[in-house]
């Protein structure tokens, strides 16, 4: 609806459009981000990721975030310089591995990847107590574990739940998108780019009006 300017093309038209313009859709997704940046409605300084499993088609590949983070970091690095630079990456336990932490460090990005399922109710004394001294170890995993346990780290990681999780709920419940309709990883990525581009356009309209 949002990409089609409130018109209602039939299913065959939509399916043909998606298959034909997958690469162009990914490029348009980036252009929408550039537009949002120029409108001062976007900052990439802190990037938030979450693991989500949409209902797959029969031929779709198994979800494996460990293999996906490095290509995604490469794509982030290739974004136009006008977008700014990602300084911190927030992601849930589905993305945690020593290799992914090291990959973030090699891209000069501070990782805050949850290492385990977090308790919803941290003990009061632990929550209000002073931060422990920073470790002297050079291991980026050890450094990240300490950062996650600090007050500043917990506050920063908490932003992921506020900014990422609601988007998936709105895409599923309000926009009505619940599953992939194209087969194969490359086509699924293109379809997801279309869905998220539609969300971004919708969001830009709301923020611009405000």
Image (tube, rainbow, N blue to C red):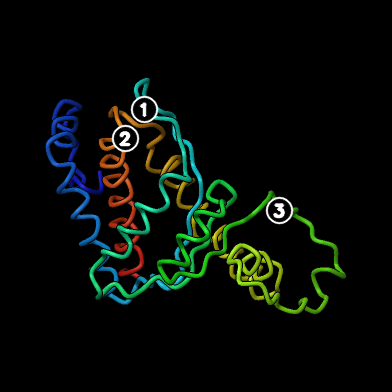
Q: Position of residue 196 (x, y in %)?
A: 33, 50
Which of marks 1 and 2 precedes in the sequence?
Answer: 1
Indicate left or right for 169 with 107 as reference. Answer: right
Give the Cα distance between marks 3 and 1.
Answer: 30 Å
Q: Position of residue 133 (x, y in %)?
A: 75, 79
Give the Cα distance between marks 2 and 1.
Answer: 6 Å
**Residue 20, picture quadrant:** top left
Q: Quadrant of the C terminus?
A: bottom left
Q: Is residue 69 above or below residue 135?
A: above
What is the secondary structure assignment of the residue under circle 2? Answer: helix
- Mark 2 or 3: in front is 2
Indicate left or right for 12 with 188 as reference. Answer: left
**Residue 103, picture quadrant:** bottom left
Residue visible at 56% across and 51% down in the picture:
97
Q: Position of residue 109 (x, y in %)?
A: 45, 69
Residue under label 2: 185
Q: Is residue 175 above or below residue 75?
A: above
Camera-side residue of 106 and 185:
106
Residue under label 1: 60
What is the secondary structure assignment of the residue under circle 3? Answer: loop
Indicate left or right for 85 with 162 as reference. Answer: left
Residue under label 3: 118
Residue visible at 29% across and 62% down in the picture:
205
């Amino acid at each position: 609806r949002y990409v089609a300017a409130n018109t209602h093309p039939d299913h065959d038209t939509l399916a043909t459009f998606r298959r034909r313009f997958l690469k162009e859709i990914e490029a348009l997704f980036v252009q929408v981000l550039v537009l949002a940046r120029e409108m001062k409605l976007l900052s990439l300084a802190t990037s938030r990721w979450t693991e989500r499993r949409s209902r797959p088609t029969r031929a779709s590949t198994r979800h494996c975030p460990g293999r996906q983070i490095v290509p995604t970091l490469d794509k982030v690095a290739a974004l136009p310089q006008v977008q700014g630079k990602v300084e911190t990456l927030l992601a849930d336990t589905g993305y945690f591995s020593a290799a992914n932490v090291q990959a973030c460090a090699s891209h000069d990005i501070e990782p805050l990847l949850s290492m385990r399922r977090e308790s919803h109710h941290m003990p009061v004394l632990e929550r209000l107590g002073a931060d422990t001294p920073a470790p002297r170890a050079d291991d980026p995993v050890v450094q990240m574990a300490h950062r996650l346990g600090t007050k500043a780290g917990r506050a920063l990681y908490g932003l992921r739940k506020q900014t990422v999780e609601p988007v998936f709920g709105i895409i599923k419940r309000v926009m009505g998108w619940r599953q992939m309709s194209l087969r194969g990883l490359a086509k699924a990525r293109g379809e997801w780019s279309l869905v998220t581009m539609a969300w971004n356009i919708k969001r830009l309209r709301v923020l611009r009006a405000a």
